[in-house]
Amino acid sequence: MHPARPITVARRTPPAALWLLIGFLALLPLRIAAAQSTIGEMRRQATRAELEMAAKAAESASLQAPSEKTRAKLQSDAAALRNRLANGDFVPGDRILLLVEGDTALSDTFTVRGDRKLPLPNLADISLQGVLDSELEPYLTQELSKYLKTVSLTATPLVRLSLLGFPQSNFFTVPVDQSITDVIAAAGGWGTTTVPSKAIVRRGGELLMDSRSTMEAVRQGKTVGDMALRDGDEIFVPDKASATFNWQTAIGVVSSLTGVYFLVRYGFRGRGG
């Protein structure tokens, strides 16, 4: 009996928009480089050819950058892409949902070890060093064909996300090809007390996607992989009470504190003569 598969959808083919992004990056390096704060990661399902093109475009753009800051950013993006091409997408602790037709022992969720190898029952460990997400299924098919006569499988990386501020805030393990709208639905939707337009994505306490980028991803129905999300990333939506803080409130608080200061500083001095 196959294990229950987490909420999932069919894998999507690379969107035409990605090719436009790469083309624009090569033709208009400064404008695009400034807009793409996470070009060094791109989407999880990007192919090797797409990553190669993006790396070359970032390297080319860095040569024309007018400032050291922009040049450093582009060089960092290119290095991140080159590192991804060399080491692959899978790191220790990553989980992969493997479903092999006709083999219940190999149909389960498996965890990548510290040496980037995937341990499978009754088989030699399979190294995932240098393997991209987009290459996982054909690669595992090739490796398992060394032991099995016929191989028909699906392999889906899983990502553990933290959703905070939602009606059912919790940790959720979802397939990398899962739509972000389905992930939000699993947490109870936006609810009635939140401000969806202020939702953000954080990684390690640092801002990964601002509210504008997050809502655009939701509007487009992007997948977890399209957003380049990783284990431990956090989707946070504030409630209406915390989101109503504005500069008028801040100015009122500062004015009150200023009044108290002058009362203490000068009022009591006046009384003392």
Image: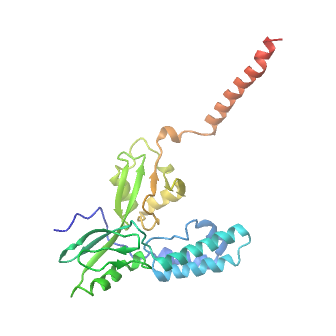
x and y, in percent, of residue 133 in the image: 40, 75
The outermost residue toward the right is 273
Q: Quadrant of the N terminus?
A: bottom left
Q: Residue visible at 36% across and 57% down? A: 183
How many marks on residues? 0
The outermost residue toward the left is 1
The coloring applied to the image is rainbow
Task: Check the image and report above or below for 252 versus 57.
Answer: above
Specify whether 105 is left or right of 111. Answer: left
Specify whether 24 is left or right of 162. Answer: right
Q: Residue visible at 61% across and 71% down? A: 76
x and y, in percent, of residue 73 in the image: 64, 69
Q: Residue visible at 29% across and 61% down? A: 7
Q: Quadrant of the C terminus?
A: top right
User: For residue 130, what is the image quadrant?
Assistant: bottom left
x and y, in percent, of residue 89 in the image: 44, 73
Specify whether 193 is left or right of 211. Answer: left
x and y, in percent, of residue 119 in the image: 31, 73
Q: Residue visible at 38% across and 54% down? A: 184
Task: Check the image and report above or below for 82 versus 272.
Answer: below
Q: Is residue 98 in view from this perspective? A: yes
Q: Is residue 209 in view from this perspective? A: no
Q: Which sits in the foreground, 100 or 201?
A: 100
Specify whether 54 is left or right of 123. Answer: right
